[in-house]
Image (spheres, rainbow, N blue to C red):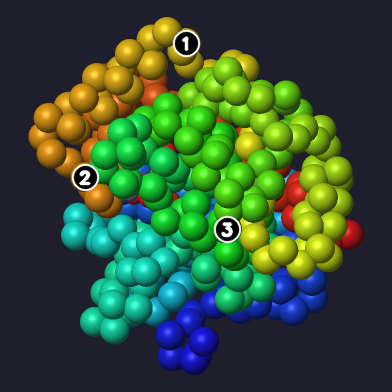
Amino acid sequence: MKPEFLAIHPDIQSALDQRRPVVALESTIITHGMPYPENVRTAIEVEETVRANGALPATVAVIDGKIAIGLSKSALERLATTKDVVKASGRDLAAVMSRGGSAGTTVSATMRIAALAGIKIFATGGVGGVHRGAQETFDVSADLVELGRTAVTVVCAGVKSILDIPLTLEYLETQRVPVIAAGSDDFPAFYTRSSGLKADHRLDTPEQIARAIAIHWQLGSGSGMLIANPIPEADALDPAIIDGMIADAVAEAAEQGIGRKELTPFLLARINELSGGSSLRANIALVKNNAALAARIAASLDA
Ligand code: PSU
Ligand code: MN
């Protein structure tokens, strides 16, 4: 990419040049996933967590028409407080950059950018997936398509039940994306440690996961990998309670005709309201947990 479109922080560039561990972080979670001020506080704490676990954080966003890799605190604050910042998936990047705009990058956009920069591991909360009712709406997140074609490993806490979890796993299977649960037999469901479905594979240590990543690349399949890391026990929510709130939020979205890129942010905000903030607390805890695992994997990959 031409340098006029890319602002990569010098510390991150030199870490990459010297093959030191770097973890990419997305920014739609800041702009559209959490309310202010928890969004900016979490973004900063997640970066600290990556550092504390032996890697350099590289938060990705579009700022004034340029892809920024590594954001200053003031850039984070600006992203977190500006109301009309766009949610950009990979396909939105060119148009937003062409007009000099700013955007939070989703998992699909952040994967694309990480691949361009040579960053192999990326931590987030939850990836997008196949939405409930997708048989009618066709709503399948571009994150899943990107996972099928971009060789970046994404550490997440599984998939939230705002989505159709069995169909999401089917789609990932079709896209040749390995789904590996970290230290668990079950595929986790974001707020809870199990979706009731088995993950395809279980690996127990960052070293084992790093080895699987290295082998996957040597096989040359070109797809990404999904590492599903269950939320810590102490932060997990009661499925009986949260599942009801999710169902209510999904029904409200359908009644109000909310679709396309507005749907996921609407559901996250509504579930936070319905749960009196407990979903947000769980979300913050699991993102940090994922950042720690991603940093450890990155550190053993480059070791
Ligand atoms: N899930 C969350 N928090 C988020 C997102 C998903 O719990 O912030 C964001 C991520 O950036 C993800 C995007 O890539 O939503 C997916 O959006 P969509 O479902 O519109 O593809
Ligand atoms: Mn969608």
Q: Nearer the viewer, residue 143 or 6?
A: 143
Does any portion of residue 41 appear in the rendered image? no
Quadrant of the image occupied by residue 228: top right
Element type where label 2 sits in the image: loop
Q: Crowdedness of circle 3 by 10 Å Cα count: few (<14), some, many (20+)?
A: many
Q: Nearer the viewer, residue 218 or 277?
A: 218
Residue lying farthest top? 240
Give the mark nearer the N terminus: 1 vs 3. 3
Amino acid type, callout 2:
Gly
173 above or below 275? below
Separation of residues labelled 1 and 3 (CA atoms): 32 Å
Amino acid type, callout 3:
Gly
Instruction: Between label 2 and label 1, give the one nearer the viewer.
Output: 2
Q: Crowdedness of circle 1 by 10 Å Cα count: few (<14), some, many (20+)?
A: few
Element type where label 3 sits in the image: helix
Give the mark nearer the N terminus: 2 vs 3. 3
According to the image, label 3 marks what residue?
148
Element type where label 1 sits in the image: loop
Label at residue 42 = none
According to the image, label 2 marks what residue?
259
Quadrant of the image occupied by residue 131: top left
Pinpoint residue 298: horizontal percent, then vertical percent: 75, 55
Quadrant location of the C terminus in the rendered image: bottom right
